Amino acid sequence: MPLLLERNTRLYAELPALSWQGPSGTGLDGTGRSSTGLDGPDRVGPDRVGGEPHDDGWVTLTWAQVREHTTRLAAGYAALGVGRGDHVLLMMANRPEHWLSDLALVRLGAVPVTVYGTSAPEQVTHIARNCRARVAVVEGAAQVALWEPLSADAGVPLERIVVVEPGAEGGHFPYAALGREPVPERFEKTLDAARPEDPLTVVYTSGTTGEPKGVVLNHRHVLANASALDEVVELPPHVEHICYLPFAHIAERMLGIYLPVHRASHVHLCADPTGVAAIVRKVRPAQFFGVPRVWEKLAAAVRAVLSLLPAEQQAVIEEAARVAREHVGYRERGERPPAELEEAYARQRAEVLLPLLAAGGLDRISWAASASAPMSIEVVRFWAGFGIVIMDAWGLTETTGVATTNSPRTGFRLGSVGRPVSSVEVRVAGDGEIEVRGSTVFSGYLREDGTVGTAVDEEGWLRTGDIGRLDDDGFLWLTDRKKEMIVTSTGKNVSPALVENALKEHPLIGQALVHGDNRSYLVALLVLDAETAPAWAEAHGIDKDTGPGVMASLAAHPVVREEVDRAVTAANARLNRTEQVKRYRLLAQEWGPATGELTPSLKMKRRVIRDKYAVALGELYED
């Protein structure tokens, strides 16, 4: 069922299919249906879901059922006083109530605003004040406790909290009561009436360097981005998408909501990101997006398994990987691989690589992508050895997501973030800062008085804060964030991401932070990889604890420390003198959103890490 557009500038009317595991969870009558017994793959109709049939505890809504559910939810929110242009705050995991509410509010003409589930109380207060929402929809008791005090805050206009989980309402409005009344026919005629310039959502930046800022995106921005991406991405019709990143992140907003509407796709919700690997094995998706840390973790898990195989099997796999990388090399240069290489690759792919990929559900991948931060070239080459070319992309919340991307259709360069998509122009200023303008550059930042303040110059250029270069073929190469560049006491500029990625090329090192602003040399905090380190220790005959202290035991083990020393030395050999790490501290505890060192989109909060380990960093500079 194609998306209905008015001059391709608004998002409405025809909706994607939706699947999730567990109970119906929609708060409406009916529990959906199994996705078996559907019409043919090329036929379009309201009972289609688009993706592969499956059951085993999954609930699926067809396109028609999604339309029915969102119509009734829109009526329910309207009954609570939500009207056109009103902001509504959403704080839930990737569950059907979140996804359906988001689309229902869009159809109503309201503006959904998702808040990261890991946001600190002061961030929640800031967002509530800034967007002036009168209604918040939250998951359960923990979120109620976070939002309830705001009802008494004179600076926050919050009037009503809708609670999804039964029994957690505590006197607030139950989500299950939404949309229970019949929907008048005249109400349905008021839906899907958005204008191209109407706000579609406000996405708050993750706050890595300060308070979150509300990025206002309208229907025109999103449809322009969707159209530009379709020009460079080749996917099967009604392609499935596994939705596991937070909806507060622009990547999942585009991939998990807006592009599925545009493409009439099938969305599979994953409420717990730690369970995404199991869903990948179940769905076997044709496309998969992961921020760099996700691809790093997957690579570490695969390496850990491969390291336990007999040497002869490892040799077979490495030969297959060599052939795959050679094949990718020809494609990267825009050359046709020789016939004998094509034949060798086809054989290795069928006999070695596909069976390995099938074990992880990645054997049907035709589009693998990443964005959000510079990707380690070592990780990219690792996956190229399986025939999976990660199409690295770049963009900001302020550019409605992707502004540049690699693509098999238009060309790719491993290590770059590709060429600009057709909706934007990209240039590099004299100081190396990347600037962008075009139809997907945002309206501006939301002010507390409801107005929108522009952030572009008089010619429409947005300064992105990222540092990079454009090569002669038009590919963009990222260096770092402008605000994160290290300036040593000798006045040298150093990209921490470049050094950190060099350190992480060794599989034992899962995370790294480089420090050295206004210092004469660089130091680093290194974290052992939780998947690779135990397998590496076993392969090297190291006796270790098996309980919760295993990582601390390994971090202190002399053989492990010797290997990390060699890893740092190897990284330094590839770096210039200013970039080299002179001292480091090896840590055992992995950084994550729950402990505050990473944003929900898995970017490092450098200031938080530096503050948390200030003593350790200081000791690295002591004589």
Image (tube, helix red, strand yellow):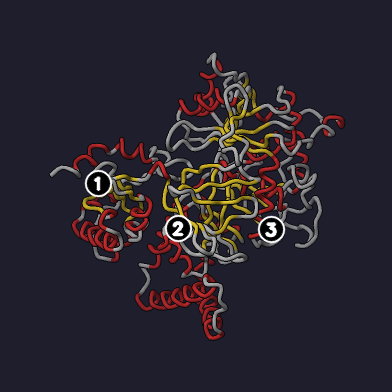
- If the image is split into quadrants, where does the C terminus sit? top left
Cα distance between the residues tagged 1 and 3: 62 Å
- Residue denoted by label 3: 53
Q: Amino acid at mark 2?
A: Leu
Classify 10 Å Cα crowding around label 2: few (below 14), some (14-19), many (20 and above). Answer: some
Seen at 44% across and 52% down, the residue is: 293
Q: Name the N-terminal-most of marks 1 and 3.
A: 3
User: Which three-letter amino acid code belongs to the residue tagged 3?
Assistant: Pro
What's under tag 1, amino acid-wise? Thr
Q: CA distance from mark 2 to mark 3?
A: 26 Å
x and y percentages locating residue 469 in the rendered image: 46, 55
Q: Earlier in the sequence, mark 1 or mark 2?
A: 2
| Image: 334 above or below 561 | below
Q: Nearer the viewer, residue 385 or 569?
A: 569
Q: Determine which residue is flagged by label 2.
A: 298
Question: Which is closer to the viewer, label 2 or label 3?
Answer: 2
Which percent across, then down, holds residue 230?
67, 56
Residue at which label 1 appears: 490
Give the residue at x 46% y 47%.
433
Left or right: residue 317 versus residue 473 is left
Q: Nearer the viewer, residue 29 or 240?
A: 240
Image location of residue 202, percent across then percent down = 61, 34
- Say which of 544 and 510 sits in front: 510
Residue 21 visible at all? no
Q: Marks 1 and 2: which is nearer the front?
A: 1
Which mark lies nearer to you, 1 or 3? 1
Q: Alpha-carbon distance for marks 1 and 2?
A: 39 Å
